[in-house]
Image (cartoon, helix red, strand yellow):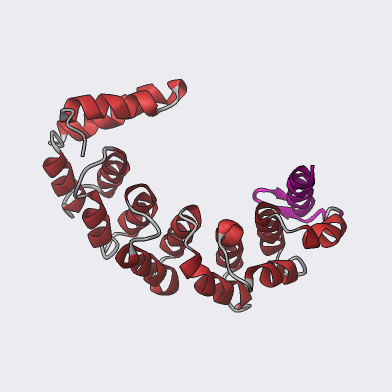
């Protein structure tokens, strides 16, 4: 942890935010400080305190993950079991900033959330974090989820996206097959992930998919296919 004072580290968090977000960040921090978060230990107590409103605890998780606090990783692992869905989700997302793919305990806990949490939002947060951290050890879980046609389409799509930077011999074939999935969400995310994977074997299939005008919350499937093709072309230049 830095030798800077707690107040100096709070100011550093604000400075790292883009200028248009600094006012709201300062207000968030002021609210937490007013609630008693005047040190690392006090902030950790606040986010653990189940009598504190979940929105304030969630804001505390956001701040704790950016302060470089020594105990943040253990706090978030504990909060993965919190009864509040919002807090489990925030804890799963926050772990991406305070640990690494080498942390087998944290990775196992996140994989467990993806597999078993009762809340869809928490499962998605776990997949997002594992994808952000490029945890190839989680590829088998994502492959199984993507292949499970009974699963929620958004979860399957997020599993495809999470594999964008993972390494596993089965990933390309699974993503390639997902370009024909009945769900536009899955096709969209599979195209994105293949573009990130950078394997030119996908070019012909992605070219066909560029005619797919099915709409998703993120845009048309064709837009994802076209972006993937642009990425693949740039890699070949």
Residue at image position (22%, 43%) is 69
Q: Where are the magenta residues, as a range? A: 211-237
Residue 190 in view here: yes
Q: How many marks?
A: 0
Which residue is nearer to you in this view: 202 or 41? 202
Residue at image position (46%, 59%) is 130
Residue at image position (46%, 22%) is 20
On screen, residue 171 above or below 18: below
Task: Examine the image and state in which quarter residue 87 appears.
Answer: bottom left
On screen, residue 190 above or below 36: below
As for residue 69 lying within the magenta part, the answer is: no
Which residue is nearer to you in this view: 31 or 81? 81
From the top left corner, tell me how far across and down residue 31 is, in percent: 23, 31
From the top left corner, tell me how far across and down residue 70 is, in percent: 20, 46
Please give left or right for residue 1 compared with residue 231 in the image: left
Residue 151 in view here: no
Q: Quadrant of the C terminus?
A: top right
Q: Quadrant of the N terminus?
A: top left
As for residue 231 lying within the magenta part, the answer is: yes
On screen, residue 211 above or below 40: below
Please give left or right for residue 83 compared with residue 44 in the image: right
From the top left corner, tell me how far across and down residue 140 is, in percent: 53, 74
Task: Examine the image and state in which quarter residue 107 appears.
Answer: bottom left
Residue reaching furthest front? 237
From the top left corner, tell me how far across and down residue 134 is, in percent: 50, 57
């Amino acid at each position: 942890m830095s030798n800077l004072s707690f107040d100096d580290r709070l100011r550093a968090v604000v400075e790292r935010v883009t200028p248009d977000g600094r006012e709201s960040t300062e207000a968030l921090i002021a609210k937490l400080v007013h609630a008693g978060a005047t040190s690392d230990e006090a902030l950790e107590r606040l986010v653990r305190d189940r009598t504190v409103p979940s929105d304030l605890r969630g804001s505390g998780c956001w701040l704790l993950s950016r302060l470089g606090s020594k105990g943040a990783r253990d706090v978030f692992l504990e909060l993965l079991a919190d009864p509040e869905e919002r807090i489990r989700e925030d804890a799963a997302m926050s772990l991406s900033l305070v640990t690494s793919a080498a942390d087998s305990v944290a990775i196992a806990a996140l994989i467990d959330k993806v597999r078993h949490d009762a809340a869809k939002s928490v499962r998605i947060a776990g997949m997002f974090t594992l994808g952000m951290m490029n945890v190839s050890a989680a590829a088998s879980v994502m492959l199984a989820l993507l292949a499970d046609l009974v699963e929620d389409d958004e979860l399957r799509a997020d599993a495809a996206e999470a594999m964008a930077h993972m390494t596993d011999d089965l990933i390309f074939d699974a993503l390639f097959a997902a370009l024909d999935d009945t769900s536009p969400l899955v096709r969209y995310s599979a195209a994105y992930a293949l573009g990130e994977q950078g394997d030119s074997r996908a070019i012909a299939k992605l070219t066909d998919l560029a005619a797919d005008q099915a709409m998703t919350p993120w845009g048309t499937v064709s837009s994802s296919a076209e972006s993937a093709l642009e990425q693949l072309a740039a890699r070949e230049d």
